[in-house]
Amino acid sequence: MSLPDDSPHTPSLFRWSPYSIKRTMFSWLLLITVVYAVQPPPSYRPFIVNNFDLNDYHSHNTILRFLNSIQNNRSRVRSLGLSSEQRHIPIVKISALDTTRPPVEVFIDAGFHAREWISVATALRLIYNLSRTNDWPSNVNIYVVPVANPDGYEYTRTFDRDWRNTRSILAPNFRNCRGVDANRNFPFHWAGQGTSNDPCSEIYHGPRPLSEPEARVVAQFLSKHANTLRAYISLHSYHNAILVPFGYRSNARPRDYDELMWTALDMTRAMNSLYGNNYTAINSAQLYPAAGCSDDYAKSLGIKYVYTMELTTGEFNRQYVGFETPRELIQQTYDEVRAALLTLLLKVSEL
């Protein structure tokens, strides 16, 4: 039996005044704010599989050995091609569980920019999870390129942690200025805004479209599979944002931009429900205009859902870390990307 609000026997909890309600709400908000503010930063916890710690960073050769070791009846690794310095660019295919209907396909790459290690580590976690669980829609083939720029990646491990580009030698008169920004080397609006023709620039677009084998093999794969690919995701860092094309200039939008943005917002909500890192969904050019990028190229091929994910805030324990994301954040970042990817795959599987 419930008591009416004005009953003298109503507990005080149900007879608060508007002032006391506001005061209590403020107290709770203050408590939540304080608890969140003093929450300790994530701690490092190893996740060992076949002597490979998925919550740490590794060399390119170690990554290749790990990918070979975890192959099963659902996942296969092969070389997509060779880099300028003749390193293999691995691609892993995780096959759909449901073989009774034609699968749809999703492509994910990471590590185009050499210093963005967190993207590589996150892609490796995704590969392991995708090939070992049934959490994903059963009619989706997923392709993952975890180290798209292996030469640059290795260079960051041994010489210059802040290196961004490939390691090709394309300008003989600038031998001290090696490499190209692989994510400005795609043919769609190549050499436009946000790029440079200076071989010494971090955003050097290269002497011609797809001059870099790292960009070329990805572009060839996307073009070959354009009719079956339903989504393309490129993992980068850092800006805690999901970028929606186009990015080659401000105010350039694909026809289905609103739908892409709504889906991106759903993905950010899934991410933000975990750790409160406040991921946002914005147009790529809002971050900065950049032409010749892989996401714009993928969208130009007619692939439906195309996004660049800028992972992490660039901070750890209230201090700026930039691209040097500590290993303590690998688990958290993977969890966020996994939540976003599951949201997207559920939508893709219905196409």
Image: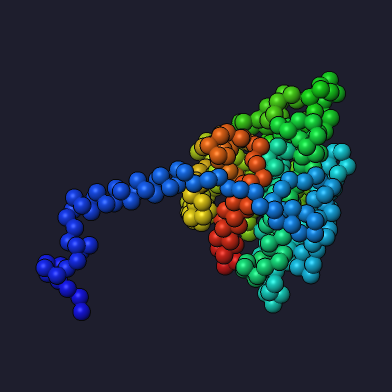
Q: Quarter of the image containing the N terminus?
A: bottom left
Query: Who's the residue at 88% across and 42% down the image?
Result: 86
- Could you tell me residue 315's position as x and y percent? 56, 38
Quarter residue 324 falls in: top right
Depth check: 351 or 235 in front?
Answer: 235
Q: Is residue 264 above or below residue 87?
A: below
Q: Residue furthest bottom?
A: 1
Q: Is residue 145 above or below residue 185?
A: below
Q: Residue furthest top?
A: 173
Query: Who's the residue at 60% across and 66% down the image?
Result: 349
Depth check: 199 or 149 in front?
Answer: 149
Quarter residue 143 falls in: bottom right
246 sits left or right of 23 in the view: right
One can see residue 206 in this view: no
Query: Who's the residue at 70% across and 69% down the image?
Result: 96
- Could you tell me residue 179's position as x and y percent? 78, 31
- Could you tell me residue 156's position as x and y percent? 76, 35
Q: Is residue 120 above or below residue 98?
A: above
Query: Who's the residue at 68% across and 62% down the image?
Result: 129
Callout count:
0
Q: Quarter of the image containing the C terminus?
A: bottom right
104 sits left or right of 78 in the view: left
- Could you tell me residue 257's position as x and y percent? 51, 49
Image colouring: rainbow
One can see residue 126 in this view: yes
